[in-house]
Amino acid sequence: MILKLLIFAIAGVLIYKFFGGRFPTLGKSPSEKKLDDDTLVECTKCSTYVTVKESIIVSNKYYCSQECTP
């Protein structure tokens, strides 16, 4: 009985390590992706492209300047 538990535990650890030490997430939505600072995003109001670093984010929407923010 203990031998079976030990074998299952070792198999579980090997599977865990095979996936890089973390379990893969299924169905990750595009909005959850981390954007780099130099990635271009479109302003919600005027459709101008600006970098993420220069943009203003309000309610998960990107704006190019204070004039465009609601």
Image (cartoon, helix red, strand yellow):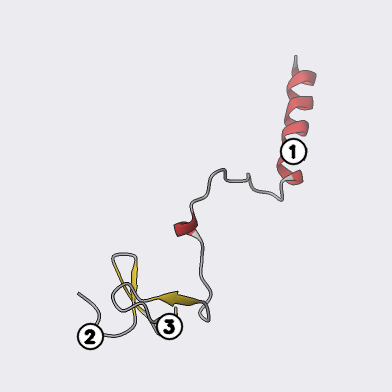
On the rendered image, what quadrant is the N terminus found in?
top right
Q: Earlier in the sequence, mark 1 or mark 3?
A: 1
Could you give the CA–CA distance between mark 1 and mark 2, rounded to whole angstroms? 53 Å
Asked if marks 3 and 2 touch (Cβ < 8 Å), the reply is no
Tell me: residue 49, above or below residue 3. below
Asked if marks 1 and 2 touch (Cβ < 8 Å), the reply is no
Which amino acid, mark 1?
A: Ile
The local secondary structure at tag 2 comes to loop
Position of 58 compared to 49: left or right? left
Q: Earlier in the sequence, mark 1 or mark 2?
A: 1
Position of 26 compared to 14: left or right? left
Q: Residue furthest top?
A: 1
Q: Pick whichever, 54 or 6, lies toward us.
A: 54
On the rendered image, what quadrant is the C terminus found in?
bottom left
The local secondary structure at tag 3 comes to strand
Q: Pick whichever, 66 or 9, lies toward us.
A: 66
Position of 12 compared to 30: left or right? right
Indicate the position of residue 52 as horizontal and vertical percent values. Answer: 44, 78
Which amino acid, mark 3?
A: Val
What residue is shown with label 1? Answer: 15
Q: Earlier in the sequence, mark 3 or mark 2?
A: 3
Q: Which mark is residue 67?
A: 2
What residue is shown with label 3? Answer: 50
Indicate the position of residue 11 as horizontal and vertical percent values. Answer: 77, 32
Q: Pick whichever, 8 or 23, lies toward us.
A: 23
Taking the spot 25% from the left edge, 81% from the top edge, the residue there is: 68
The local secondary structure at tag 1 comes to helix
Taking the spot 44% from the left edge, 58% from the top edge, the residue there is: 31
> What crowding class fits label 2: few (fewer than 14 Cα within 10 Å), some (14-19), or many (20 or more)?
few
Tell me: residue 28, above or below residue 6. below
Could you give the CA–CA distance between mark 1 and mark 3, rounded to whole angstroms? 43 Å
Indicate the position of residue 44 as horizontal and vertical percent values. Answer: 32, 72
